[in-house]
Amino acid sequence: MKSLFVAFGVLSLTAISFTRCGAEDPQSNQSEIQSQSSASSSREASGKPQVTGLSAKASGPTVINLTWDSVSNATAYWIYRDTLVAAIVTSSNYIHKEVRPNTTYTYAIAAVVNGILGPKSSSVTVKTPR
């Protein structure tokens, strides 16, 4: 019972400290977090191979085929559709079947090498037929 009380006390102090910090100036804290996140992402991605040769082709009103040049030592590829991750795959191609007719999509790919996600490729845009 003693250890439960100590743990509860630590959690309570942490919550109070967090609330007080956040109440001072939430906007500047948010800007600082975003700035640190961007800097961290840049450091992680720098020097990592970038996917090249991305091609997208609509092969029907509800299917888009993506292909790209493989990256040496890549263990996975993150496929971005617009701003969302549509899939994570291990090969250098992907068939996206969850698209709508007569709709424009933008894709980019990032490779994972040595456990670190590299930078996004140049994006490509494709429109599905009606």
Image: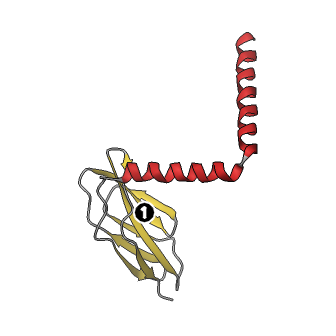
Q: Position of residue 96 (x, y in %)?
A: 44, 70
Look at mark 1 in the image and give the residue it sits on.
79
Which residue is depicted at the point 52% across and 82% down?
A: 103
Give the residue type at disc 1. Ile
Q: Answer left or right for 77 relative to 72.
A: right
Local SS, label 1? strand
Residue farthest bottom in this picture? 130
Residue 8: image quadrant is top right
Q: Position of residue 53 (x, y in %)?
A: 28, 71
**Is residue 117 or residue 30 the one in the foreground?**
30
Residue farthest top in this picture? 2
The colour scheme used to paint the residues is: secondary structure
Which residue is depicted at the point 45% across and 48% down?
A: 40
Q: Position of residue 57 (x, y in %)?
A: 37, 79
Q: Position of residue 89 (x, y in %)?
A: 38, 57
Compared with residue 33, is residue 69 higher up or lower down, i.e. above or below?
Answer: below
**Image quadrant where one finds the N terminus:** top right
**Is residue 86 or residue 118 the one in the foreground?**
118
Q: Answer left or right for 52 relative to 18.
A: left
Residue 10: image quadrant is top right
**Is residue 61 or residue 84 the one in the foreground?**
84
Q: Answer left or right for 20 relative to 96.
A: right
